[in-house]
Image: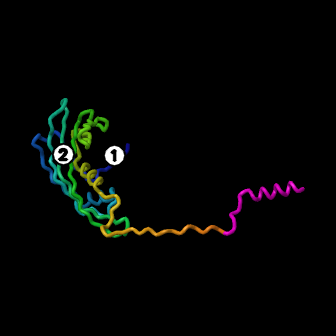
Amino acid sequence: MTAGPVAEFARPVVADQITPEGRVLTLDATEAERAALAQRFGLDALDRLVAELTVRRLGARRGATRLEVAGRLEADVGQTCVVTLAPLHRRIEEAVRQRYSDEDDATPGAVDIDAGEGDLEEPPGPIVGGVIDVGELLAETLGLAIDPHPRAPDATFEATAVPPEPIPETPAPKPFAALAALKRGADES
């Protein structure tokens, strides 16, 4: 039996303990959690990761538990400029909003499409065993907010033209020249 993936920033919330008024959570990643997340996302450093979230119960639909998590994430990340290789330090501030449900239709295939909006609402995440992990939600939000190609503001890329290879003055040997010579020798005899 193999163990599942280890959550670097686990913050489980028991769904039955959430009321319609909601519960405010203030989360601050430990140094070890930040180091693990930095490794997961290929960062040079993750100096700070904090969030303030409100978890509230939504009206039940067909007897299912439905929750909404909303709030804000802030992080200070260290990356390397892809042009100059200089260290960069960036502040990430992202809104967080995700719904969860223990309904059977809380799957990626159950998306309601409203053509008038332009933005599609993300399908609800699953409530597994009566628990949601808001830490993993924050980790995913952080991962999506990280610039995959960080560039210093003053970095300029100057492409240098590579001259083409010179054409050799002697023609390249032909692969079947030796066979042609053998054939010519056979025809002459």
Percent position of residue 126, x then y: 26, 39
Which amino acid lies under the numbered mark 2 shown in the image of this protein? Answer: Val
Depth check: 187 or 50 in front?
Answer: 187
Q: Residue at x 37, y 45 (%)?
A: 2
Kindly state the secondary structure of the residue where label 1 is placed: loop
Would you say the residues marked 2 and 1 are in contact, meaning their CB atoms lie under 8 Å apart?
A: no
Which residue is tagged 2?
69
Depth check: 12 or 110 in front?
Answer: 110
Percent position of residue 34, x then y: 26, 59
Depth check: 71 or 64 in front?
Answer: 71
- Residue 184 covered by magenta stretch: yes
Query: Label 1: how many residues lie within 10 Å, few (<14), some (14-19) or many (20+)?
Result: few
Q: How is the image coloured?
A: rainbow
Q: Quadrant of the C terminus?
A: bottom right
Percent position of residue 95, x then y: 20, 52
- Whichever of labels 2 and 1 marks the residue nearer the N terminus, that label is 1
| Marks 2, 1: nearer the viewer | 2
- Location of residue 129 (image quadrant): top left
Percent position of residue 11, x then y: 22, 49
Query: With respect to residue 35, does 99 lie above or below?
Result: above
Which residue is tagged 1?
4
Q: Is residue 77 left or right of residue 165?
A: left
Query: With respect to residue 187, does 78 lie above or below?
Result: below
Which amino acid lies under the numbered mark 1 shown in the image of this protein? Answer: Gly
Q: Is residue 162 left or right of residue 46?
A: right
